[in-house]
Amino acid sequence: MLRVRKYVSMVRTAGELMMNFLKKHTQKVKEQMSELKWNVLALYLARKDPRIPLRSKILVAVAVAYLLTPIDLIPDFIPVIGQLEDIVIVPALLGFAMRSIPPELLREYKEKAMLEFRKGSPKSYIGMIMVIAVWVLIILLVTYLILESLSIL
């Protein structure tokens, strides 16, 4: 009985520590997610500015199209790789895109985004079409290779 009480006490303590951690960091995570949203929308607006170099515009277009499309290049239901894509690719694209724009321009577009997109975010249908096209090509390639290996073609 003493072991059970000790175990229950340890679990309760661990639970309390976890709850305290979550309470302490939840607000910070919410603030960072809000900041991320405005940065993405600022990049979306900045993509057409003539003061931004072509290389930066291409990088911004790729990052924003990928981030705003509702379809992932690697679906999340694929174990590990699907989640890893969200953890690695998205922040890397955002970081490269944000570093490629002069800070004063980024601040300007962040302020514009906060004014313009209070009601909701834009949708990237071109990005969605590009991702769908990549998946269709992959499916066609796999189908072709399977049929060829079975000597059907």
Image (tube, rainbow, N blue to C red):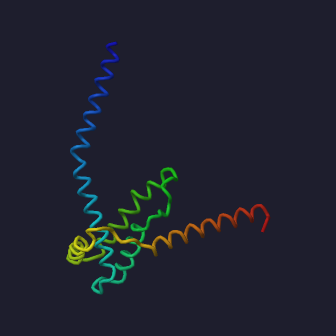
Count every numbered label the image shows and give the total.
0
Image position of 141 (left or right of 64): right
Residue at the location (36% across, 72% down)? 122
| The furthest residue to the top | 1
Residue 12 rendering spot, x and y as whole percentages? 28, 28
Percent of width and height locating residue 24: 21, 45
Residue with the most extreme bottom position: 50
Residue 152 placement (x, y as % from top left): 79, 65
Seen in the picture, residue 69 relative to 104 is either above or below; the reply is: above
Residue farthest to the right, as pictured: 151
Q: Residue at x 44, y 64 (%)?
A: 70
Q: Nearer the viewer, residue 15 or 94?
A: 15
Judge from the rendering whether residue 83 lies leftward or rightward of residue 10; answer left or right.
right
Q: Is 5 rendered above or below residue 125? A: above
Nearer-the-camera pick, 99 or 20 = 20
Residue, x 51% and y 53% (percent of image)?
77
| Residue 81 horizontal side relative to residue 10, left or right | right
- In the displayed structure, 149 sits above or below 127; it is above
Where, quadrant-wise, is the C terminus in this rendering?
bottom right
x and y, in percent, of residue 27 in the image: 22, 51
* Vertical order, 88 against 47 (above or below): above
Q: Quadrant of residue 114?
A: bottom left
